[in-house]
Image: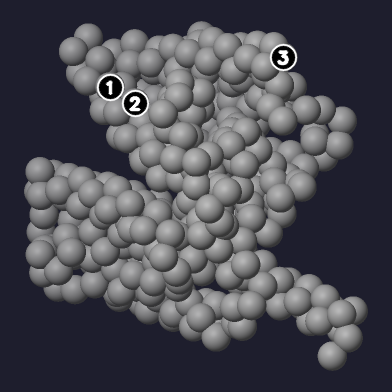
Amino acid sequence: MTSSNRDRQRMVKDRKLAILLHFVFFLSGITTILIGQVLPILSRGLALNDLQAGYLFPAQFGGAILGTLASNWFGRLNGFVSATVVGSSAMALGVTAMSMNSFEGCLAGFFVNGLGVGLTLPAINMLVLEMNPLRGASALSILNFCWGLGAIVCKPFVDATASEQSIYVTSVFLSIPLLIGAALIALLPRDRASKPLNITNDAASMPQAAAIWTGALAWAVALFNFIQVGFESGVGGWLTTYADRLHGAPVINLFSPTFLYFLFFVAGRGVAPLYFRFMSENQVLFLDIGLMLVGMLIILAAYDLAWLSIGAAVAGLGASSVFPTNLSRFARTFGPAAAHRATPLFISGTLGGAAVTVLIGSISNQVTDLRAGMFVLLACVGFLGMIQIALAIRRIHRPEP
């Protein structure tokens, strides 16, 4: 076989793998936020009180942490392809267990689903990053756009498939495509997909890999991720309640502030690759943080739904491409070995999401005003701006090779 034929076959295999990765990532967008959509149904079907229903959240959170650690282990031993296959299968098993007619089974289902999410999200991000070393930020923005589409369709999907007290049909319709995606990825030839994963065996890369987390720079990027994911989780978790209280009644119209936030969040990730044709990573991040700042100022100053919707749309557009751009910066700064040393980066984001969401609720409960709690999000934007300035200055004075 000639070299050109081998290259052509390799490109075909890469294209198939990329399509499957984006498909599974879309499904993971549904499974990640599924808990919020099915919680009222499970509470009715299992006769759960609010305390019991609340146990489902730390179950999924704990599973996600373990999954992230396991993703790093898979990456070192067998490659991120294996982590994707196992993670997709775990999500399928988890969403199936959620439909069990027992609280313990449902609790286990959310834990296993979180385990699958923790395995799959870092693994697919790193696979796509390794397959696109010259356009990492652009490729990751498209990938995370697929996740956002899954998040958007989650609620209509649950409404169309679930009954008043059961999510059995929902579980079946979600677990089957997850298993199909896992099987197809497992059956793909590994000759191309496994090549980038062998870099940990390269002795020349080991000193660099070992040194990543011994310096302040990597932790600064991780702190940036902690705050950014915390911002996203805080807005996604509290904006609906904030809008309801501002409105004085549940907001049920389609173009609600929450809907517009996620709409512009996903749309921003879709158009983000266009930014990088004209702007550097640092310039894009400064633009994003500026939009987040404007959006939060409008949200906090709003006294009607119209202004709140405008602020939510601006904040969603600003937050859209920050995570993938920061991930690309991490890989570009530390080189190929960074893909196998990114576990603290992903764990920091998971912890940030939990910390910021809890802090908003705690402040709101103490002062009996959710608007006061939402100022935590404004503080997040301020901290992001300061960290970004510090990282940009370091880039100017100490450019990476």
Q: What element carries label 3?
A: helix
| Residue 165, picture quadrant | bottom left
Q: Residue 278 or 329: which is nearer the viewer?
A: 329
Q: Position of residue 19 (x, y in %)?
A: 67, 70
**Amino acid type of disc 2?**
Val
Mark drawn on residue 116? none
The residue mark sitting in front, 3 or 1, is 3
- The answer to which of marks 2 and 3 sits earlier in the sequence is 2
| Residue 76, picture quadrant | bottom left
Residue closest to the far bottom: 1
Q: Is the residue 157 above or below the residue 52 in the image?
A: below
Apparent side of residue 82 relative to residue 107 in the rendered image (left or right): right
**Amino acid type of disc 3?**
Ile
Question: Is the N terminus in the top left, top right, bottom left or bottom right quadrant?
Answer: bottom right
Q: Is the residue 322 above or below the residue 187 in the image?
A: above
Q: Tell me the distance, in whole angstroms, between the alpha carbons under discs 2 and 3.
A: 31 Å
Apparent side of residue 207 relative to residue 282 in the rendered image (left or right): left
Q: Is mark 2 on a helix, strand or loop?
A: helix
Mark drawn on residue 359? 1
Colouring rule applied to residues? one colour
The residue mark sitting in front, 2 or 3, is 3
Q: Residue 387 or 255: which is nearer the viewer?
A: 387
Q: Position of residue 259 (x, y in %)?
A: 54, 40
Residue holding disc 3: 396
- The answer to which of marks 3 and 1 sits earlier in the sequence is 1
Mark drawn on residue 356? 2
Q: Do the residues labelled 2 and 1 touch (CB within 8 Å)?
A: yes
* Residue at x 48%, y 77% (from the top left corner): 182
* Residue at x 87%, y 80% (from the top left corner): 3
| Residue 128, picture quadrant | bottom right
**Amino acid type of disc 1?**
Leu
Q: Tell me the distance, in whole angstroms, between the alpha carbons under discs 3 and 1.
A: 35 Å
